[in-house]
Image (spheres, rainbow, N blue to C red):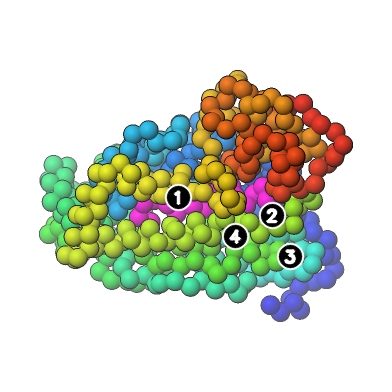
Amino acid sequence: MDSSRFSDADRAPVFDVIIAGCGPTGAMLAAELRLHDVRVLVLEKETEPVSFVRIVGLHMRSLELMAMRGLLDRMLEHGRKRPAGGFFAAIDKPAPKGLDSAHAYLLGIPQPTIERLLEEHATRLGAQVRRGGAVTGFEQDDEGVTVELADGEQLRSRYLVGCDGARSTVRKLLGVGFPGEPARTETLMGEMKVGVPQEEIAAKVSEIGRTNKRFWLRPFGEGAYSVVVPAAGVSDRAEPPTLEDFRQQLRTIAGTDFGVHSPRWLSRFGDATRLAERYRVGRVLLAGDAAHIHPPTGGQGLNLGVQDAFNLGWKLAAQIRGWAPGTLLDTYQAERRPVAEDVLDNTRAQMELHSTGPGPQAVRRLLTELMDFDEVNRHLIEKITAIGIRYDFGEGPDLLGRRLPDLDVKGGRLYGLLHRGRGLLLDRTERLTVGGWADRVDHLADPTAGLDVPCVLLRPDGHVAWIGDDQQDLDDHLSRWFGNPARPDRRSAPTATRPG
């Protein structure tokens, strides 16, 4: 990048982190950083929040993350619970019994609502959000990043994170490759009113839906319908479709346009699949759709981005606060990029199963039979909802690297102890301590906790970083994940408190 465009007048960072993009990923990341008193500025190029009401789904793992930060009740007020089944390629199978989550459901919630709630959460914690601030350039050096906006203003930060979507300006300026496959098919989606009786619509949707899983009309309230129909071909996604595009495709596939009129919003999406070659270059990082894109089948996109932010937030904060172990920030890419690879693979598979060709339909029928086996159904549900993720922390019990469910613990529920974004030692032996790490790790001594192991050390994202009962082994793992102790010669008593 041409550094002559940037002034050397003042290179001292004003912010610790500048985030490009205030969608769910950017807002979640801002909030996670603010839990650790990191100075955060979120730049959103759009001057107003999104106005169209698209319903998105929060899967089990995302619901758990919201519970960990005290946000779930607010989400539940604005969403609708739906059964946790039928996610994989829209194969209509109920969820297996006994899923290992206190939140074994899908929460349908309007996208503008979740964006508003997460932005309010971030600003309540002290993040600054500036709308109409488009990033057009940046330059990084040993001390920070100089960010240039569309109006020529320059801002200085220690780190920059691109959460600015599939067409990420940050990723492009960073020169990170985005290999994958371009869109081969495209689907129209929108909300509009119809001019025929509901019974007629239901009959036609049932008939076509037996083989075409990219077609539906669903009542949305107030006389409106959610309409999804395959497009005629692949076009420029920057150009929104017209109502006539919908009418033509409905007539082609269903033989009628159902009298659609008065659209609330119209959009299109393709099945392009791409993954950033790197999630970090120096002081610039990528998260959410800026790092990966895939078809929306299975409803994983927003969830994947929010979970990126949850993984990155405490690690970047640790780097800024000065206690991060040397390789901690590198674990962001090491952990999250394989998760994205898996999502890309399962969405590729699902899109093949959506095809109306005889071969894909034969595979779909076979998989439908296989999903009658509880193990198969459970594996696919856990994959889509992200509760089956296991990060590679080295050899150890199967629980190591997995998230811990929201257990009953002394005084309430486990996730209520994680609202502050700190680590937690859950100690059934009542004889371990967190010692000099008490400024960043809480300790709950609870012999009644529903674990089949003596003790676990949880990272701020709820993943199990250590299992055992030996103090020296615990100290080694506290150092691995939480850096050097602040007070190496002192031991702390149990300190876990439940936030109000």
Q: Tell me where residue 51 appears, x and y as whole percent.
A: 45, 50
**Is residue 429 in view?**
yes
Q: Position of residue 454 (x, y in %)?
A: 61, 31
Give the crowd class for mark 3: few <14, some 14-19, many >=20 residues within 10 Å: many
Which quadrant: the C terminus? top right
Q: Quadrant of residue 34?
A: top right
SS of the residue at dot 4? helix
- Nearest to the eye among marks 2 and 3: give it: 2
Q: Compared with residue 466, is residue 416 higher up or lower down, i.e. above or below?
A: above
Residue at x 40%, y 49% (from the top left corner): 384
Q: Which residue is mark 4?
A: 333
Secondary element at image label 3: strand
The residues tagged by marks 4 and 3 sit, at their Cα atoms, a distance apart of 20 Å
The stretch in magenta equals 296-318
Q: Amino acid at mark 2?
A: Leu
On-image quarter of the N terminus = bottom right
Magenta: main secondary structure equals helix
First of labels 4, 3 by sequence position: 3
Q: Nearer the viewer, residue 220 or 357?
A: 357
Q: Which residue is mark 3?
A: 145
Mark 4: few, some, or many residues within 10 Å (few <14, many ≥20)?
A: some
Relative height, residue 439 to residue 131 (above, below): above
Residue furthest right as drawn: 489
Marks 4 and 2 sit apart, C-alpha to C-alpha, by 10 Å
Quote the CA–CA distance across marks 2 and 3: 20 Å
User: 10 Å neighbourhood of mark 1: few (<14), some, or many (≥20)?
Assistant: few
